[in-house]
Image (spheres, rainbow, N blue to C red):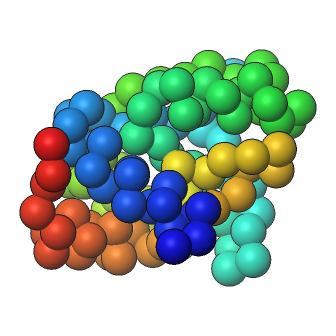
Amino acid sequence: MSLSGAHRAAFRREAAGEGRVYSIRDAGGLAAPAVDEGWAVPFWSKPTRAGRVVDQVEAYRDFQVVAVDVDEWLDGWLPRLEADGMLVGVNWAGARATGYDLTPAQVRQWFEDEPAEK
């Protein structure tokens, strides 16, 4: 399994255990960089993962980690992201903050299909 694949698997498992997902924002709003397929809003399964990106990636140095309840994220945030044509980045990591980018529909299906492992 690739490192990105491992981060994807950890996202599903850890998000269920935490009951929250985490993103980063600054005064202008959530991070939403351009990716190969359009624009993505990154989310992490642990605040420490998000914090590591804020610490390591110069573009995100002034961002703060924000928590979102998983149910609120699945039922409210993902439909809004989908309506806006955005992708969902999961557990991006590294000096360039890269990883898996999925459609909101793929993420919802993934949470419906895979039983939560705690």
Who's the residue at 80% across and 30% down the image? 56
Q: Is residue 15 left or right of residue 52?
A: left
Q: Is residue 26 left or right of residue 83?
A: right
Residue 18 in view in this figure: yes
List x then y, in percent, for residue 73.
29, 46
Who's the residue at 39% across and 52% down the image? 10
> Camera-side residue: 4 or 54?
4
**Relative height, residue 61 to residue 97 (above, below):** above
Who's the residue at 61% across and 51% down the image? 92
List x then y, in percent, for residue 50.
57, 32
Who's the residue at 47% across and 26% down the image? 47
**Relative height, residue 81 to residue 67 (above, below):** below
- The image quarter containing residue 18 is top left
- The image quarter containing residue 20 is top left
Residue 69 in view in this figure: no
List x then y, in percent, for residue 39.
67, 65
How many callouts does the rendering have?
Answer: 0
List x then y, in percent, for residue 75.
20, 53
- Quadrant in the picture for the C terminus: top left
**Relative height, residue 48 to residue 16 (above, below):** above
- Determine the residue located farthest toward the right in the rendered image: 58
- The image quarter containing residue 103 is bottom left
